[in-house]
Image (cartoon, helix red, strand yellow):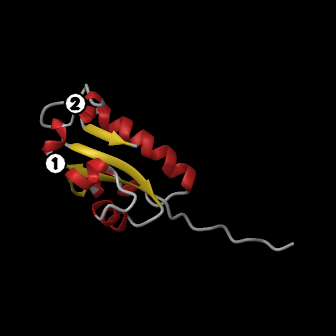
Amino acid sequence: MVKRRPRSYHYNVYVVELSDAVWNVAKFREANPGHVLGKPFVYVGMTGLDPDTRLDRHMAGVQSNRFVREFGLRLVPKLYEVYNPMPYDGARDMEVELAIGLREQGFGVWQA
């Protein structure tokens, strides 16, 4: 029997700050009825790539989210670095939990 070495964790959650203009999109407003004036607008995602590389791919239109492609400004590492890297299941769950937590703080959040 051959023992396999466990794969290193390489999945990441990430947060992209979105421009204020995203608030003009009805679908985004409807998803964020609890947004607190002055709090940032963000996109929360997960990836098997480095977050910088993933943001570049969004901006280039490769498997991109509309809100990131049209309104993305920059990554916000202070909101996610503490969690990375992690296994796939952990990243999948953390993406949802992070989005919920930011929404509870009044952020405008898109998480797909």
Secondary element at tag 1: loop
Q: Could you classify mark 2 by the number of other residues whose Cα lies within 10 Å: few (under 14), some (14-19), or many (20 or more)?
A: many
* Residue sitting at the far front: 61
What's the residue type where badge 2 is placed? Answer: His
What's the residue type where badge 1 is placed? Answer: Ser
Picture residue at 22% right of the left edge, 52% below the top: 70
User: Which residue does the numbered mark 1 point to in the structure image?
Assistant: 19
Q: x and y percent of residue 103 in the render?
A: 30, 34
Q: In this picture, is 69 found above or below 38?
A: below
Q: Is residue 106 left or right of residue 7?
A: left
Q: Looking at this view, is 110 or 106 the one in front? A: 110
Q: x and y percent of residue 78 in the render?
A: 28, 54
User: Which residue does the numbered mark 2 point to in the structure image?
Assistant: 35
Q: In this picture, is 40 found above or below 61?
A: above
**Which quarter of the figure has residue 108?**
top left
Sequence-wise, the earlier of marks 1 and 2 is: 1
